Amino acid sequence: MKKSDLDKVKIKQIPAQKRTNPFANVFDEFVGFCRSRSMFMLHYCTGCGAIELPPAMTSRFDMERLGIQPMVSPRQADILLITGYVSIKTLKRVILTYEQMAAPKYVIGICSCTVNGGMYWQSYATAKKLDEYFPVDLYIAGCMPRPEAVIEGLQQLMQKIKANEANSWKQYYKNYDYFLGNQQHLFGNNWQTPTDVIGEAETYQLAGPNTLGEHTKILQSVQTPLKPLEMKL
Amino acid sequence: MSIAHSQNLNVLLQEIEGIQLTFHNPRRLRADIAAEALPALLALLRGRASYVHLSAISCVDWIDDNQFELVYHLWSYETSVLISAHIRVPRDPGIYLSVFDIYTPAAFFERDIHEMFGLYFEGSPDMSKFILTEWNGPPPMRKDFDSEKWVMETFSWQQYHPDWLQELEQQGGGIVSTPESIRAGNRPMENKS
Amino acid sequence: MKISLKSKKAPAINHSDSGSLLNPLKNLQFLVRKPITEPLQPRLASLNYRGFHLNDWQACVGCASCQKICDNAAISMVEIPSLPNDPVKGIRNHRPAIDYGRCCWCALCVDICPSSSLSLSREYVHTCDQQHIDSYFILPDPNGMHQQHFGKGWQKTEHSDLLSLTRTAMAELEPEKRVDNFDEIVDGFTPEQAVLEASRCVQCGMCHDSCPTHMHAPEYIRAIWNGDAEEAVRQIYRSNPFAHTCGRVCTRRCETACSIGIRGEPIAIRWLKRYAMDAVSHERIKEIVNENFTAKSSGKKIAIIGAGPAGLTAAFDLVRSGHKVEVFEALAHAGGMTRFGIPDYRLPFDSLQQDIDIITSLGVKIHTHCRIGKNKRMSTLQKNYDAVILAIGLQQGRQTRIKNSEHRHVYRAVDLLQKISLGEKFDLSHSVAVIGGGNVAMDIARSLARMQKQQYGKIQITLTALEQQQHFMADPEEIKEALEEGIIIKDSCGPQSCEIDSNGKLIGLKTWKVTSIFDENNRFAPQYDEQDEVVHNCEAVVEAIGQYSDTSLLGTELTEKLEWNRGRLQVDENGRTSESWLWSAGDCVNGPDVVHAVADGHKVAASIEQQLQLKTK
Amino acid sequence: MRPENYQAVNHPPSHEFELNFGPNHPGIEGNFALKVKLQGDIVVEARTDAGYLHRGFEKLMEDRLWIQNIALVPRICVPDPVPMEVCYSLAVEDLANIEVPERAQWIRVLQLELSRIAAHLFFFGGHAATTGMYTPMYWGVADRDLLLDLFEELTGGRIYSIYNLPGGVRQDVPEGFLQRVSDTLDYIDGRLKDYDNLFFTNQIFVKRARGVGTINQQQALDWSVTGPNLRACGLEFDVRRDDPYLIYPQLDFDIPTEQAGDALARTLVRRLEMVESIRIIRQVIKALPDIKGPLRTPIPNPLAWRVPAGESYARVESSKGEVAYYVVSNGGEKPYRVHIRGPSAMHAVQVLEKLAVGSRLEDIAQTIFSLDACPPEVDR
């Protein structure tokens, strides 16, 4: 599929839904509140913006005040913070990591580079628009944003989670074909990850009309059973 | 650098045939030699003239001459002089000898040059990919690889259309020149009048 | 500088294994210290912080220099129709819009900004979600990104300014060396100076927009910077066949509009043009002009009356379109006012001749000494040619009509200049008063000064004008040079009469002090202080207060047929008169200005071309 | 949820196994990976896997104006960006034959040394965290932030100062700035004792780091080790003194060395260097008010600035070691070629691969951090 065709795909945003049952509503709000108050941020420095995270995490700006702590393993993490540019090599790992994270998961793109290529817009090595590869909840502007801006952004995210508006992770399941298409465009048609996204989408009952499509067909045709990791030395 | 050292070095370097020396400043000495003579020069500099530190190997792609220029930057802790040994090798087939046996760090630089320029070093311990393991294109540092063109063909950009822009477009204004058009060397004003 | 500061060597750290394991516990004292944690609210950034952009829309001229310096291709120029757009002043209604998905806040755009309108603020927090990603594309205004006042952060200072605001100096003759001859004053740029001067250009194109004939100045400046004078000539000839002339005596509106001129000295565009023309040999210029010119005859004939810049430019264009062009010039030489009105020290005849030579080399035929109305009639032209262009210029000097101004020693500047340039003898007075504050007044004053110096060894020229000196119509440079050459300038002097002694000899010019020139409706109505009367002693008076066109050649029949507007021929926007075969161009339509005349020539030629095409179809 | 065709990972039958150490691993610095082959917990073979932070700087720089590159270069080494700017400027100044005004040279030294302290504090925090001690990390990072405040005040940016241009620096020192630098230095000077108590003389750390990743002098020379890592082997070499640039010859400072060449020695050299940097900055603070004059030698309009054809090799001592820029101009408005020689490339690839072999898996983090390699600079 050509790049230009992919551009035409528009993703509809999912509005926050309120349930009819008032008790369920209260429950949802309670869950949102709890989620927003205990967030683990994946400790993965993908780019130069990561240099402002240690100050934000440690005593001076102290994001633990907000209940946010770094977490080293993707399985336990809630927030994937993309700190600036992602090289194509890193992007593969980031997608692997993103798919491994348990829902609900939130993605924040900081720095210019995650939006439109930033400084490295003409570089052959970096991906330009993060939202082509997986959905993003929040962007923080800056090159790089100061710790205060990062914390401000995290507070924004907390508000969104509390209001049950941070649902971008559902987009990934609903529009998997679009995201997979972009991934295939960049990594080649042999691209596959160990996570069975389609299966997960069905389990979560989030599979929609755009979950499957021509790209998932390609994936299913090339998908090979996982083998033990091989390393050449 | 003391005069004694300089004379010593001069005497030593006489052994290499066809060497041309130019002092850029007292601490930067440029040596131009034939590609075949380089290993001998390096062996001499390392073995007998205290140039033990290989600071870097740089590669320059002189595409108009169809040549790669290799520059070996060597530093002597004793005389505090940096010798840059320049050689030229043909771009095609792009093969040269490794100096790994003389300077161990050369392995890294040679691997890097091989990856970025596609210049193969015979005898280097490892010529496998390193940084660009997931890159299938041509060696990117070659002058004939146009990074911007590749990017334009591969990626798409944000199509911003904020409210203020829509308002201006209704008034008859709007974007008159994008940065890309400026980079292409067009002066958009010219066509207007 | 050598500084000697006593300092102690750092004590080595004792890290032996024998240190106490309890050492870290010493730091338990920090439990009672004040924490260094900052409040959750974002702090105020430092005074020169590089935060989000601000742009003063009043100051910004839309030159797009920021767009060119931006290393991240983050800046688009946006047209805002509600803002003023004035090409003559060098103001565009374009403003930069910045993509924060690219920007890196390096502030190079601020440091290069010719108008100093861009700055960065101390604001640094912006977040948005996917739906509002458009908020990353902003149009900076003075109010800030979120309409909140954070104050300016990084601003340009004298240290960080990246533009070079001073002109490259060019050698010229000293006043004492130039005052007794008609040698050209300026030497022109050397190749090094030209490249340096050309490098100052930011390629904004304001010059192109403001130029009446829209010369491709950014392109030829770039070509000069590239050391390619031939390419510069090629670019110049795209829009101006009077390149030698305009390289010397152009009124250079481009330099008024130049963005660099907002805070510094504008690029010397005129001198760069002169450099390019002088750097290439005459023969080579001819070849360049003839590139892509295939003479295929259209069979049409066009007559042009007047071989000035307007007429010859039209001839240049038309002959290149394959028409047969004949030019009728009343005087002995082609060139019009540039030949007979501009003295040699400003525009050497040779340079002008080169321009004309290139035009004639294309096949334009110039008949000199051929005065229409006398040697040939208009009706003959109408009959024999497909189109006729009237480009007769302003050849008659206006008169003050003050008392005694019909005295034989009261001259018109244009007449005298013509005599000087033709080398005709005339009775040069020992002391002269010039009336007028324009360039023509300066030309005649300085020409006469040179002749006085040559013949009498002494200069006695007084220049009087209604305006105050800072409001003279003449170029400031001209005034400066005139003063350097020993011409006395008396400003705010309204001429009242020429004083004559009992023998009928002119002895002086009487003036009154001017209190105001225009009335409240901005109409010309000078008011004088009659008490402040001065008589400037002189043997001759020269009037240089403007020119008019002598249209008697048209003949009464045609004059009555044509439409007129306040004494000038009425023409439409294409220079066409009410008669379908007659066009008019140049000073006689627009008033005096070389480059305007060139522009007019192009315009008329295009209009004729269009008309002829229509006819053929 | 596992795919239906999922198969469990089969380990090779031998007791040797392979491990991906990074890129997303708490024991690795930044976005960088090491593939190791283990026998038990002894490393048999190690291969670095870089390129996660590759942006192709050298390619990008060939396509930007001489001045525009100033915004690009600090990004090459994120924790210590100033030497990159200064080194690039020095190379271009050498090519274009520009004399830098004296005041600008002093201000550059001020920045370079502030940046060195900041980088060492950051290193110290990171190294302590890998050792399992979190308080030093909190301290180091927070105290470094005070220096970043100074950078913000001087240059307008916390991390990327973009403050040095070929020809000089962009703005003057703000009023009262030197006093604030002095106060901050006094504070950090006073804190060094606390750091010693908590970390540098802490027996837990000393015993942990001693003998880990030892490089001997011959190896250091053979492997082109530079900077603090070289000085930790007892070799007294510093670009600032031996290949001097700016006004370093006028300054009085020592070059601290250690003999052991192990992780502990490397850490201690950095600790001692902070003291020397403080000494240098104090000299600058004393001298700078008396040095008047311009801040920048004007360069032509940057949009049309051509640097004469030629080549230049400029070297600067950064907190990690020898930074060098090889800049080639063909007389155009953009560099023809820029080769960036970063110290970390040597340390993180060449040295680390050799040191890791034979060491225990848990020592690898110690080794990487004590070498203070900077992954973005390896990848460029």
Image: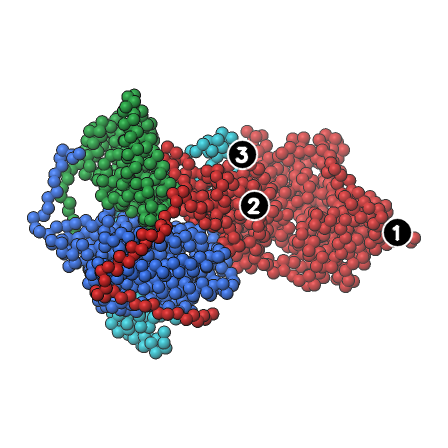
Chain colours: A green, B cyan, C red, D blue
Residue depicted at x 32% and y 40%: A66
Residue B174 to residue D140: above or below:
above
- In the picture of the structure, the residue carrying the numbered disc 3 is C81
Q: Label 1 lies in what chain?
A: C
Residue D219: x and y, percent? 22, 66
Q: Measure the alpha-carbon separation of dots 3 and 1.
A: 61 Å
Residue A211: x and y, percent? 25, 29
Q: Residue furthest right?
A: C502
Q: Is residue C251 left or right of residue D118?
A: right
Sequence-first disc among 2 and 1: 2
Amino acid on which disc 2 is placed: Cys
Q: Are marks 2 and 3 in contact (CB under 8 Å)?
A: no
Residue depicted at x 52% and y 59%: C192
Q: Label 3 lies in what chain?
A: C
Q: Dividing the image into 4 quarters, which one contains the N terminus of chain D?
A: top left
User: For numbered disc 3, what is the local secondary structure?
Assistant: loop
